[in-house]
Image (spheres, rainbow, N blue to C red):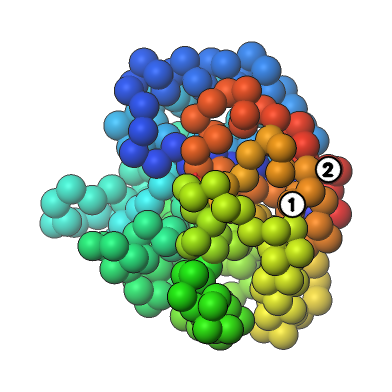
Amino acid sequence: MRKPLVAGNWKMNLSGAQAEQLAQALVARVGQVDRVQIVVCPPFPYLLRVRAVLAGSKIALGAQNCHHEAKGAFTGEVSPTMLVDCGCQWVIVGHSERRGGKVQEKDDLIRKKINAAHAAGLHVILCVGETLFERQNNETPSVIENQLVGCLEGMPADKMASVVLAYEPVWAIGTGHNATPQQAQEVQQFIRNWLDDQFGAGLAAATRVLYGGSVKPDNAGSLLTQPDVDGALVGGASLVADDFVGIINAAPAGK
Ligand code: 13P
């Protein structure tokens, strides 16, 4: 049974006080929810403050990125062990905002981050997704497959057990144009089939695949009830307690 997972990626938003207030509102409203696994990923400087608010609730703490080494001369970077030290259980890797733009993270680096996160005991949310140009050129399956191969091929099963996939079409992020439920299902079924080919039916059936990209309370129900959509990775709507709670409430029982 795959328990639904709804994760909030707060990105580079909020003040420390606002982050605490948002966490307090979530603890009050969904802090004891068991049906859905809930994760919030604040900016690094607020991890400890949010951790203190989440204490005693079932909401888990995650980070938005990590370095691929445990320690060393890497100015400005944060290691997975430091994240664990700050109370994180999760880390997002491979987000398109880090694959693209000025950061230009490549699959081999993302693979190293997954390995480092696993070594530190973190669960990983690995993002994959195509650009609008790639979709319009019918490259979606090959782009997704290349990302999966580059980041995950040959990964031992024990590492895969701590990986959650997130299909985030780049054209749907922050645009208000979410993928249709059919588009999300089509790609997420493709991802599960790839997992089946690589790692076998058991792991494919157990691995959660989230959808991300303009998820809101009013579209969450139709997206999250698709057979291969096991939850959501939420950006903008995760900054508003009412909206994030609405998405959590729209998640169906596990599949
Ligand atoms: P939006 O929900 O704002 O489209 O962002 C999605 C996202 O990038 C989550 O990681």
Amino acid carrying label 2: it is Pro
From the viewer's perspective, is the residue at label 2 or at label 1 nearer? 1
The residue that appears at 62% across and 29% down in the rendered structure is 243
- Percent x, y for residue 60? 57, 35
The residue that appears at 46% across and 26% down in the rendered structure is 51
Up/down of 53 relative to 163, above or below? above
Is 161 positioned to the left or the right of 23 in the image? right
Front-lying residue, 15 or 111: 15
Evaluate whether residue 90 shows in this view: no
Evaluate whether residue 33 shows in this view: yes
Q: Residues within 10 Å of mark 2 (few under 14, many from 20)?
A: some
Quadrant assignment, res 238:
top right
Front-lying residue, 250 or 208: 250
Looking at marks 2 and 1 on the same chain, the residue that comes earlier in the sequence is marked by 1
Count of labels in the image: 2
Residue 25 badge: none
Up/down of 207 relative to 202, above or below? above
Up/down of 193 relative to 91, above or below? below
Q: Split into 4 quadrants, where in the image is the C terminus?
A: bottom right
- Percent x, y for residue 194? 68, 80
Up/down of 199 relative to 103, above or below? below
Amino acid carrying label 1: it is Leu
Is 106 positioned to the left or the right of 219 in the image? left
Quadrant assignment, res 87:
top left
The residue that disc 1 covers is: 223
Q: Split into 4 quadrants, where in the image is the N terminus?
A: bottom right
The residue that appears at 53% across and 15% down in the rendered structure is 24
Alpha-carbon span between mark 2 and mark 1: 10 Å
Residue 252 badge: 2
Q: Residues within 10 Å of mark 1 (few under 14, many from 20)?
A: many
The residue that appears at 31% across and 51% down in the rendered structure is 79
- Percent x, y for residue 28? 64, 14
